[in-house]
Image: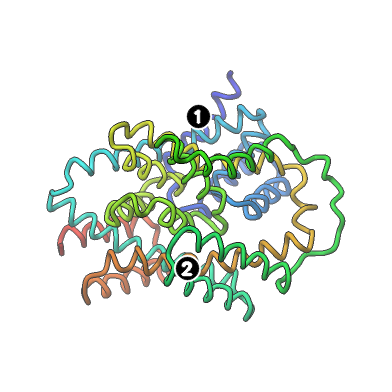
Amino acid sequence: MKPLLDIFLKFLLLGCVSFGGPAAHIGYFHNRFVDKLKWIDEAAYARLIALSQFLPGPGSSQVGFALGLNRAGLAGGMAAFVGFTLPSFLLMYLAATFSASFADDPHLLGLIAGLKLLAVVVVADASATMYKNFCQTRLSAGIAVATAATLLVLPDLLSQLAVLAGAALTGVLFGQQGSRAELQTASRIRPLPLLLFVLLLIGLPLARGWTPALQLLADFYQAGSLVFGGGHVVLPLLQGSVGDQISPDRFLLGYAAAQAVPGPMFTLATFLGAELQPASPLSGALLATAAIFLPGFLLVLALHGAWQEIARRPLVAGAVWGINAAVVGLLLSALYQPVFVSAVTGPRDIALLAAGLFVLRVLKAPILVLVAGFSAAGLLLH
């Protein structure tokens, strides 16, 4: 138990101070576990980062899970996950439960208005960054635009699944592909977690109508299985799956809160799970959080030893290339609906957005500076 407690405490400390999103988390992990503790060398750490980019799911949390997995097996991976996620989980749960008790308070309404504007800035910044990274050819830019246009006209989960599948097929047929190296280490794939991932992905939607808990598990597991491209992409996927069950204001409050707390952005699921089960908010928060993280962890367990050879296969590389382009369009559609239309009410809000984008993209200010600034603006102006 001592190694597990050590892993838990080290990740708990990081979970309390890891502001700034997935890229910053990767830096915190490198400083702590590569530079200082020497748990892993540079080359092995680079492989873990590449694995997290290749798979769907929460990238930085997958790296943390893999670090714990390398250190003490499956129990070590779980200890790392719980430690890193616990502070964010608690803060998001408190945000969901206490904010509902003061829903009509004018100060809270002003704070929410400011944080909703912050969400516009953050999603716009993420969209621009991902466009630069994933849309470097005419075809990839076209995939992004076609995805955004489709989802603006047909904003439902089925449309999201259809455009992701279409983008993957386009990437296989026409996109950038890897080398034609044969898969040499297929025997190192762990079949049990991969089988469990597939069974849950197929079985949970079939059983979602049996109980509210299964519906919650199905919605959040499906979202966690499809999030390529970083934590911000979880916004449109969850909007498509559970957005009709929760008001836009509450949804965006949860997203804005996820920017303001340390730890993984995927704890947006904590907030939404508590909202969706008001009679038992803690169980809803726990179920939703576990369900959205589980797919990525199952895939890490399954492919940890063989991913490099798999990623070099031309069909897989092409499909990932197409999906990466599509998630840019998916995020662009979410930038308009629900983010922009729910947050912006007039020219004053546009002025605040312009200032926020300047501070974030040009001055490179930490996210906490923007949280404080938009919170103050919301309290003063609304």
- Judge the density around disc 2: few (<14), some (14-19), many (≥20) Cα neighbours within 10 Å: many
Residue receiving disc 1: 9
Residue depicted at 38% across the width and 41% down the height? 273
Q: CA distance from mark 2 to mark 1?
A: 34 Å
Give the percent coordinates (x, y) of residue 76: 61, 29
Q: Nearer the viewer, residue 322 or 259?
A: 322
Amino acid at dot 2: Ser
**Does any portion of residue 34 appear in the rendered image?**
yes
Residue 163 or 77: which is nearer the viewer? 163
Considering the image in quadrants, where does the C terminus appear? bottom left
Q: Residue at x 59, y 38 (%)?
A: 65
Q: At label 1, which amino acid type do we have?
A: Leu
* Dot label at residue 127: 2
Which of label 2 and label 1 is nearer to you? 2
Q: Which quadrant of the view contains residue 80? A: top right
Judged from this view, the residue extending furthest toward the bottom is 138
Task: Return the x and y of residue 245 as percentages of the image width and height.
Answer: 33, 49
